[in-house]
Amino acid sequence: MTSADASARRRTPNWAGRNYTLLTSAAFITNLGSQGALIAAAFAVLESGGSGGDVGLVAAARTLPLVVFLLIGGAVADRLPRHRVMVAANALNCASQGLFALLVLVGEPRLWQMMLLTALGGTGQAFFGPAAEGMLMSSVSGEQAGRAFAVFRMAMQGAALGGAALGGAMVAVIGPGWVLAADALAFAVAGALRSFLDVSHIPPRAPGSGLLSDLREGWREFIGRPWLWGIVVQFSIANAVVAAADAVYGPLVARDHLGGAGPWGLALGFFGAGTVGGALLMTRWKPHRLLLAGTLCVFPLALPSAALAIPTSVPVLCAVMLCTGVTVEVFSVSWMTALHQEIPEEKLSRVSAYDWFGSVAMVPPATALAGPAESAFGRSPALWGCAALVVLVTAAVLCVPDVRNLRRTGGRTVRAQHAGSDSADAERAVGGLG
């Protein structure tokens, strides 16, 4: 080892290995580009003569394939080398965003073209997400895993916050086409970084009996753990009502009571800052009862809907959003640490896919029903209903004993299993239950 290498090792924590560093750097780059691209895509639709409804159609075109292909993506990521799945997904995202940018820059893109290219991006994300989560969790070990996840999420949330601000400014100055092109370049750079990931530490997977068999095995792993499916069900409802409040009611309340889009954007920025602060907090705090601490921190997720229902002043709303961002990130890091500790390595991507599926499946119908709910009950009662549902499902999941009692162990509590083994045979030590 050279003196330069030794100096670099002294400056780098022992949990920040080569794979972890590559994964974090690539995630920072893609999040920075993708947040700006979300804004750019909306303005590209509007500048081509589209309506607000057309913006919604393009957004839905991304969500639908994400929901459809997530479970398949998880099974593929546990069957093939995860880094290859990630690189292939990045290549698809790069190509789709590059074509989107080209259409915007050289002419007037049609709605069906924008929907098709956005759908390809959602398909890429469906395969990328489970592979990326499995790869990250297999890249850290020991009692510092929670800190590693916190730093990773801090990088992601910081990039998202900066990317939204930078993307909005770039759309205003140079137009949406160039922002979409920058996102395509970000995917290309991130894919190149991920191609250098080392998977030699991951045991070879024994050939299974087929994709459907892999999906069934992932389902058995998922449904056999009450804490796992309980929290996924909780968030399927919580994410749906929060998405309805943020995407539909928030802009309307801002228009009618807060002074327009500027204050609402400021409030969302405070939420983003809160997530960065929450991740920073979790680099130091290691709650012993992982899921109890995390779930208690989900209750404040009801506060933004309640603040919009009143509605409060802009400073109060910003304070609420900041607090919510901090507490939600405490849950997110605790959740990642629990999955890393309890799920066998060779099933991480499939379990992650069921987690993602539960988190996003209810969002499209919830946002679609937000308007009719406002017409039927009124905006303020609908927002109070959103807040009440968050509190109700969070209180319900605390009735699951494993959620209250699962303890941090400082490492994995499961052995690696062959892909064909029954999940019931996996060694599972939820320390000190009961």
Image (tube, helix red, strand yellow):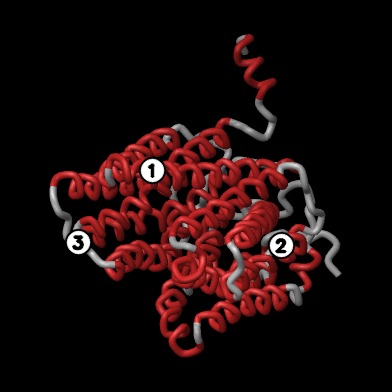
Q: Which mark is residue 297?
A: 2
Nearest to the observer: residue 124 or residue 379: 379
Residue furthest out toward the bottom: 376
Q: Residue at x 73, y 53 (%)?
A: 413
Please identify the quarter of the rendering in which residue 393 is found.
bottom right
Residue 88, horizontal then vertical, whole percent: 35, 45
Residue with the mark numbered 3: 49
Residue with the mark numbered 1: 169
Q: Secondary structure at mark 2?
A: loop
Q: Earlier in the sequence, mark 1 or mark 2?
A: 1
Q: Residue at x 78, y 48 (%)?
A: 286
Across the whole image, how many numbered discs are drawn on residues?
A: 3
Mark 2 surroundings: few (<14), some (14-19) or many (≥20) residues within 10 A = some
Residue 101, horizontal then vertical, whole percent: 24, 46
Mark 1 surroundings: few (<14), some (14-19) or many (≥20) residues within 10 A = some
Q: Secondary structure at mark 3?
A: loop
Mark 1 belongs to which amino acid?
A: Ala
Mark 3 belongs to which amino acid?
A: Gly
Real-space Cα distance between discs 1 and 3?
21 Å
Q: Are marks 1 and 3 in contact (CB under 8 Å)?
A: no
Q: Residue at x 42, y 73 (%)?
A: 364
Residue 244, horizontal then vertical, whole percent: 48, 72
Rendered position, 283 above or below 110: above
Q: Quadrant of the N terminus?
A: top right
Q: Quadrant of the C terminus?
A: bottom right
Horizontal side of residue 297 vs 36, given as left or right: right
Q: Residue at x 41, y 37 (%)?
A: 190
Rendered position, 121 above or below 8: below
Real-space Cα distance between discs 3 and 2?
43 Å
Mark 2 belongs to which amino acid?
A: Cys
